[in-house]
Amino acid sequence: MTAIITEIPAELHMTRGQKITNLVGVTLPFVGFVASIFLFWGSYVTWRDLIIFAVGYALTTLGISIGFHRLFTHRSYETYRAIRYGLAVLGSMAVQGPVIRWVSDHRKHHNFADREGDPHSPHAGFAPGLRGKLAGLWHAHVGWLFRNVGRAEWTKYAKDLLADRGMVFISRWFPAWVAASLVLPFVAGWIWGGTLDAGLQAMFWGGLIRIFLLHHITWSVNSVCHFVGSRRFQVKDESRNVWWLSWISFGESWHHNHHAFPSSAFHGLKPWELDIGGLVIRLLRRLGLVWKVNTPSVDMQRRRQLAG
Ligand SMILES: [Zn+2]
Ligand SMILES: [Zn+2]
């Protein structure tokens, strides 16, 4: 067992160069995305494409954040069956694998967090030094998808979901949700723009580019948020809070808070920690659509606070 970490070990302080490399790797796809908008404005990208993109991004990110992650993996609140299944389908349309596989891998991540057995730790099994750190980051970001994805035993990690026939059905029909994730923006663009070209262009932005961007944001939670950022609670892992990813990850990058209180429906725990997923859960609670929303009390948070 690793001892509880109460302060950041010296070897984990990153050099300026490492921090820059890290930031560039994650922000480059996003910068490329913004640059493409400017370059192709009016010809290969229009308001129509951007609106279809934004709606698709918001829905599938919520599917991952408040569906796959906060509801199915951590059971941080309860809701109606129709909403559960709706979120499972939306999350599947983010093209990050079938829901039961996603949940199993992520539960295993929490079980072993940054120790041997964690499917995507940037630390476990990597040598100290720059080379080891870069290899670890690469592994946590995308490398694990070629080595460890889907290795967590479903019968051990997702018994509850396997017992739900609807969930098994949604998980099994993953390829259909992937197809829908591309066909729906195409249809929206086609109807709105009136031409086949408009449909194809909407499929490119609202389908492919949206999937690509959300992939990198989700993977950044696995890589960056276990590598660089702030921490304030006693945890046994290397999780970090990364403020600059919070808006686009819908609050998922308050990942250190999340590792400290995994069953909390809210990842932003301070008023200034922007947590769009948490805000949506709050709204759904007000509408009476979700209940038993798990929140760590101020007292619980204080007790876990790092000294100094
Ligand atoms: Zn984590
Ligand atoms: Zn989690």
Image (cartoon, rainbow, N blue to C red):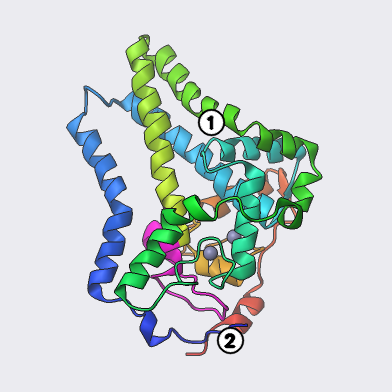
Callout 1 secondary element? helix
Pointer 1 local density, CA inside 10 Å: few below 14, some 14–19, many at least 20: many
Residue located 45% across and 24% down the image: 185
Residue 282 visible in rendering: no
Give the prevailing secondary structure in the magenta stretch: loop
On the rendered structure, is 246 left or right of 43?
right
Pointer 2 local density, CA inside 10 Å: few below 14, some 14–19, many at least 20: few
Q: Nearer the viewer, residue 242 or 23?
A: 23
Query: Is 236 covered by the magenta stretch?
Result: yes
- The relative height of residue 266 versus residue 126 in the rendered view (above or below) is above
Where is residue 292 shown, x and y percent of the image? 75, 56
Residue located 57% across and 54% down the image: 278
Where is residue 118 shown, x and y percent of the image? 57, 65
Ligand 2 appears in which quadrant? bottom right
Q: Earlier in the sequence, mark 1 or mark 2?
A: 2
Where is residue 85 shown, x and y percent of the image? 69, 37
- The relative height of residue 268 versus residue 51 in the rendered view (above or below) is below
Q: In the orientation shown, which residue stands out farthest toward the right? A: 163
Q: Are circles 1 and 2 on residues that touch, CB within 8 Å?
A: no
Q: Nearer the viewer, residue 210 or 292?
A: 210
- The relative height of residue 194 versus residue 259 in the rendered view (above or below) is above
Query: Is 6 covered by the magenta stretch?
Result: no
Residue 178 image label? 1
Residue at label 2? 3
Q: In the orientation shown, which residue stands out farthest toward the left? A: 39
Residue located 67% across and 63% down the image: 263
Q: The magenta stretch spans which residues?
A: 223-249
Residue located 30% across and 46% down the image: 29
Judge: label 2 CB < 8 Å from ligand 1. Answer: no
The amino acid type of the residue labelled 2 equals Ala
